[in-house]
Amino acid sequence: MSDSSRRQHDPKPAARPQYPALALQLVAGDRAQTWLKTYRTEIAACASSVLSTCTAYPLDSVKTRMQAYGFHHFTDCVRHTYQTEGAKGFWRGSAAPLFSITLVRTVSFSIYQKSKYAYSSWIERVTGRSPMAIINTPGTYPTPSTLVCSAAAGATAGGIITTIACPFELTKLSAQISVLMARSNVGSMDDALRRSYQQKGTFRTAANIVRHKGVVGLYAGFHLHLLRDTLGTALYFMTYESCKQVTASTIKSQSSPVAPVVAGALCGLVSWACIYPIDSAKSIYQRNCLTHRRSTNVKTPKIQFFNRAMYRGLGVSMGRSCIVNAIFFSSFEFIKARINELQD
């Protein structure tokens, strides 16, 4: 047989299996799944926060304007904003909260998740029953221990996260009401200072605050912010965990999407209804700080729970909160559930 015939009839050598490449893909896949499961709370909170914040930011902008200035009705504020600033006025200052709310919620949920299990173990040592075991058992209802555990963990998360959130929220407020500050003499007769905040982006607004007030100026109203977030976050998580537990037990389904939607909507309504005068006092105080020179001693407004003026914009805020939290928690629980379904 000739060499050419032999080459035609000889079988081709089998392809060598790429064991190293295949092993690398498997290891990378395992590592990715392990990472996803380890940080599922943070991943779900981050993605859900971006979605919910983008959806309802214009309502937050209208709420802040109604608190800081004397608009009588929601439609009055919307009409004035559109006529003087156009549609972009509703989105003014959105870059800061999109970043800060995503960061704050991600860190807040991480702190809350760790805190609630820590408090649960302390309560279990005292009472002999674990609040988290009760919450996670199908068909159970809230008890005093579960309420205390959720509220304490929420207060811890809210108190810690204020140190991150305060500069971002002040910058957001300044951007939202910058045009109103420039055209109004409420709280200050310094035209140059008031007008310096007008028509600036998020980061230029922050730089302007530092130029006039120093770095400490970014924490104007910190004491009111701390009070609002500590109390508000305690109510927020206590209401969410309790409502989700009651709803899931009532419809006899732990995996139903109804429970997160209902609980998410209610937790925002309850917390805002209770802390709104504190938030109004914070907005007024921060506005006054922005429109006065650094040397001026700005007085803290009184927190008046039965003063109708302190509830200006409450309807907008509660509607926005209901939408945001229903979207957020339904997305949050969905993403967490999908990550948990990944094979180990």
Image (tube, grey):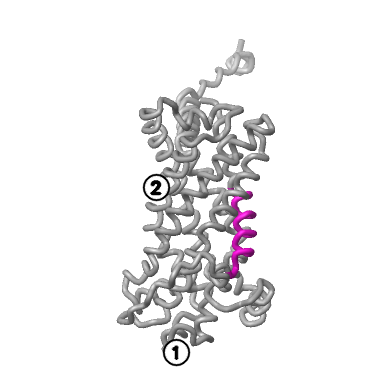
- Crowding around mark 1 (Cα neighbors within 10 Å: few <14, some 14 to 19, many 20+) is some
* Residue 9, quarter of the rendered image: top right
Classified by dominant secondary structure, the portion drawn in magenta counts as: helix
Report x, y in % for residue 11: 60, 14
Number of numbered discs visible in the structure rendering: 2
Q: Quadrant of the N terminus?
A: top right
Of marks 1 and 2, which one's residue comes earlier in the chain? 2
Taking the image as shown, residue 257 lies to the left or right of residue 276, namely right
Residue 192 spot, x, y in % from top left: 42, 88
Q: Are marks 1 and 2 in contact (CB under 8 Å)?
A: no
Stretch in magenta: 312-328
Residue shown at 50% from the left, 49% from the top = 235
Image coordinates for residue 203, horizontal then vertical, percent: 44, 70
Q: Secondary structure at mark 1?
A: helix
Tell me: 196 left or right of 334. left
Camera-side residue of 19 and 275:
275
Residue at x 61% of width, y 71% of height: 90
Q: Is residue 157 above or below residue 285?
A: above
**Residue 296, x across and y down, in percent:** 33, 81
Question: In this figure, which residue is indicated by the disc labeled 1?
Answer: 191
Q: Give residue 220's quadrant in the image.
A: bottom left
- 298 in relation to 320, above or below: below
Q: Residue 307: within the magenta?
A: no
**Closer to the eye: label 1 or 2:** 2
- In the rendered image, residue 313 lying in the magenta stretch gets the answer yes
Q: Nearer the viewer, residue 62 or 227?
A: 227
Asked if residue 326 lies left or right of residue 177, the reply is right
Instruction: Inspect the image, locate mark 2, and give the three-letter code of the amino acid beneath it.
Output: Thr
Q: Secondary structure at mark 2?
A: helix
Q: Residue at x 47, y 69 (%)?
A: 281
Q: Which residue is mark 2?
A: 156
